[in-house]
Image (cartoon, helix red, strand yellow):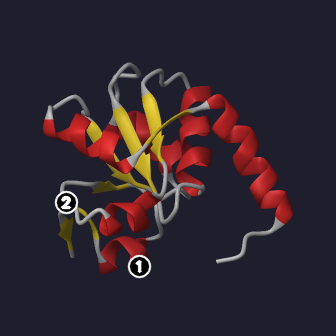
Amino acid sequence: MKHNPGFLKLVEAARARVKTCTVAEAKARLDRGEVTHFIDVREDHEFGNDHAKGARHVGKGIIERDIETLVADKRASIVLYCGGGYRSALAADALQQMGYTNVSSMDGGIKAWREAGYPMES
């Protein structure tokens, strides 16, 4: 997908402020039990098609509204992902602005997760 310049500028600014991790790093952290919340921020229909095994769905459109109910501990370890790592960077930036201190955006998103052959659910 070709992204518009304004969107890319916004994402790059967010990426400069947030922690990112590779899919391999995310998987290793999940396997070691270091990630408390693994969250898919894609649209409902995207999550419904398939998602990373064990991921919870909280769409980017509602994450700011619902996160404090779902994750009360603002120090909890959170890894966010989307389709390619753009929307999750924006969501991670928003959560940091809300006071969450241990949130990461997974670079490459679900595409990279699939390519790595990591477990999926549908």
Residue farthest to the right?
A: 6
The label nearer to you, 2 versus 1, is 2
Query: Looking at the image, which residue is at 33% across and 25% down?
Result: 76
- The residue most toward the left is 32
Q: Residues within 10 Å of mark 2 (few under 14, many from 20)?
A: few
All told, the count of numbered labels is 2
Callout 2 secondary element = loop
Asked if residue 33 lies left or right of residue 38, the reply is: left
In this view, the residue in front, 43 or 114, is 114
- The numbered dot on residue 32 is none
Q: Quadrant of residue 68?
A: top left
Q: Position of residue 80 (x, y in %)?
A: 42, 46
Classify the position of the N terminus by image quarter: bottom right
Question: Which residue is found at the position 41% from the left and 45% from the top?
Answer: 22
Residue 43 location, x and y as percent? Answer: 47, 69
Does the CB distance between marks 2 and 1 fall below 8 Å?
A: no
Question: Where residue 45 is drawn, which disc sits there?
Answer: 1
Q: At 58% across and 46% down in the image, what residue appears?
A: 89
Q: Position of residue 109 (x, y in %)?
A: 44, 58
Q: Earlier in the sequence, mark 2 or mark 1?
A: 1
> Is 38 situated above or below 115?
above
Q: Which mark is residue 53?
A: 2
Mark 1 residue element: helix
Q: Amino acid at mark 1?
A: His
